Structure formats: C-alpha cells, structure tokens
Image (cartoon, rainbow, N blue to C red):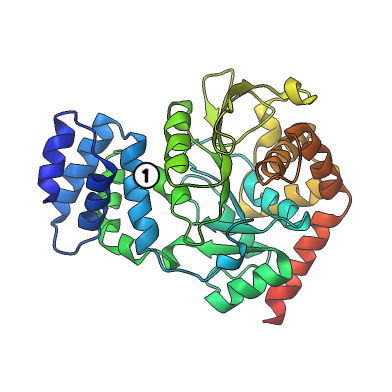
Amino acid sequence: MELNELTSLVSQGSDLSAEQAATSADLLASADVPSGVKAEFLTSLAQKGEVASEVAGIAGRFRELARNPGLEKWQADGIDVCGTGGDKIGSFNISTTVVFALAAAGVPVLKHGNKSITSKCGSANLLEALGVNLMADDATLAKSMEALGFCFMFAPAFHPAFKEIMPVRQELAAKGQRTVFNILGPLINPARPAHQLLGVFSADVVDMLASTLHALDLKAGLVAHTSLADGRGMDEMSVVGTNRVRGFGALDTVDASWNAGEFGLPEADVSDLLGGELEDNLKILDELLAGKAPAGLENTVCLNVGAALHVVGRAESIEAGIQEARDLLLGGAVKAKLSDTKDFYTAL
C-alpha cells in the first residue's frame, strides 16, 4: 500500500488498523517516499486525531526497527520513567531524579531519552552534567546496569529509521504542526522494559497512551498528567494540581483523578517545582538531597518514586512507596548513587 492511499483513508476520517499503521511507519522510514507525501500523511493523521491502534502500530514497528542494545537480562523487572515534554512549565528534572532513587532502591531502570527541545535542561542534559556518557556503547550500558542499576540510552543512537523522517518533522514543527512523533519517543524504548511511568503533556492523551502501552504488552504501568488550577498542565504526577491517571497491563483497572491529599501530602504551588538552566538544576538537586528544597518538589519526587515502586511491585501501595522514597532521598542513598555514577564513568 502506498502512503498517499493511507493519507486518503485518514483524511476521510477513517482510523487505520494496527497493520496499516505499521505499514505507514515503514513508508515514513523509507528514502523512496517524497518528503511532501510524508508531511501530508502526518498532518492528516494529526488533524484526524491519532487513536491507540494507530499509535501502537507505528510504535511497535519503530521498536522493531530500533537497534537492540542487548539488555534483555533487565527487561522483565525494568522500568522507564519519563515525560513526553511539551508542557512548557519549565519544571525541575523530576523524572531524572526518580531514576537515581529507583536505582538506589535496587529497581533496574532502562532510561531512554533525548536532549530537550522544549525546556532549558532536559534529562540528557542533567545526566551528562552528572557524569553519564550519553554516547556509551552497548557494553558500557550493560556494565552500567550491573554496577549502577540504571543506564541511559540516547535516542538518536538507537533509531536509524528516524533519519529519513527528521527533515519532515523539523519542517512541520517550524509550522507549529504537532505530529505522532511528539508522543512516540517514550513508546519506543529499544530495551523494552516491562514497566513504565509516563507523564504526558495533555489530559486528552492519557487514555489513548495507556491503551497504546497496553496494546504493546507492557507488564504494568501508569500514564499521568497534572492539571493546574490556572488551566496549564504538567507531564508529571505532582502535588500541585489534579492528577489524571490511567493504568495499563496489570494496573489497567486504575482510572482516577488524584490530588496530593489522597496520599497524605499537602498541596503545593507550581512555583515549588520550577527549574532553570543546567547550573540552577544541579543546585536544586543538591538542595533536594539535603532536605532543603521546596516541600512541593520533595513531595512530588517522592510521589513519583512511590508510584514507580508500586508499578514494579516493590510497594503494596503508592503511599507505602512514598515513605520508602523519602528515606532514599534524604537518607543518603540517592546521593551515594550520584557519587557512584560519577566514579563509574570517570573510571572508564
């Protein structure tokens, strides 16, 4: 099937089957399909509104096309924690901090990400400043999992199929046109961990992305978005608004709106969560581990760690996970993990 045939179906309002969506991924990755044809398909799909079967079909195919880092040993117990980005709030690197806390707790973290486009300091930027080699080879990634309990896979090194799509994405982004690629990144982790905690930029895509991850056969996870009182939103679970949360896999019965009080935490103002440039965020991280950060930030990090511990089955409830998270954060375990990380990469 040609891509313009799929565009025709989509532009008439038809949803693609998972098989048709997978075919579209192959055509988007092909050097033989003109850029204009790709742009028309992506625009039509976005204007119709992507559904779970389409996103799962595209994501599943790009997972197959990704370069395998050979980390299967940690797949079944592993988790990825990330946000889609795009909320424009400018919050501190919450999910990156969660990675170190989970690793300190003995939970394998297979982190997949990129340098930030929408914020001043993305996860890759902070990890690099903390000593992590973003371009580590596969052998180093495996050693990092053995020694530290986490690794970071820099997305551009694992998705050669994206090379033929990048110019089209950039062209559409310059026009302000969102595409399915704005949400694909967190769905195509090349190590394929069985668990995921995913923060998304809009409450409108929570259900769809939970259904997508369910269709991709992950073992368990949560998709969350925080709606703020002023109408803005965050791609994190937090204590500064209402968390729209949907589960998948073993947690697919979770369909809720949660506030901080449900976990015994005080509500905070979004200003508690704000980050800045790289140097600002490194300072905030030091303050957080010393118990001197704003309470809203500490509680938000603990909420996310607690949720992740629950997702992987390490905590009976999110509340129980929050208490363990606070012990990890303030008891020196996370600080020690940061020190071990720097030592590990320095010694290579």
Instruction: Residue at 25% x, 59% y: name it.
Output: 29
Q: Is residue 13 above or below residue 180?
A: above
Identify the residue at horizontal 78%, vertical 35% (top origin): 294
**Is 250 located above or below residue 60 in the figure?**
above
Residue 322, image x, y percentages: 78, 37
Tell me: residue 82, above or below residue 268: below
For the image shown, how many numbered marks are present on the structure?
Answer: 1
Residue 128 horizontal/vertical position (percent):
61, 64
Quarter of the image where the C terminus is located? bottom right
Is 244 left, or right, of 19 in this rendering? right
184 over 236 or under it: above or below: below
Q: Which image quarter: residue 253?
A: top right
Q: Pick out the residue farthest to the right.
A: 331
SS at badge 1: helix
**Residue at left offset 69%, top offset 50%:** 97
Residue type marked 1: Ala
Q: Is residue 319 left or right of residue 224?
A: right
Q: Quadrant of residue 323?
A: top right
Residue 178 in view in this figure: no
Residue 115 placement (x, y as % from top left): 50, 56
Residue position marked by numbered label 1 in the rendering: 56
Name the one closer to the observer, 265 or 318: 318
- Front-most of residues 174 and 306: 306
Q: Is residue 128 visible?
A: yes
Is residue 60 toward the left or the right of residue 298 in the image? left
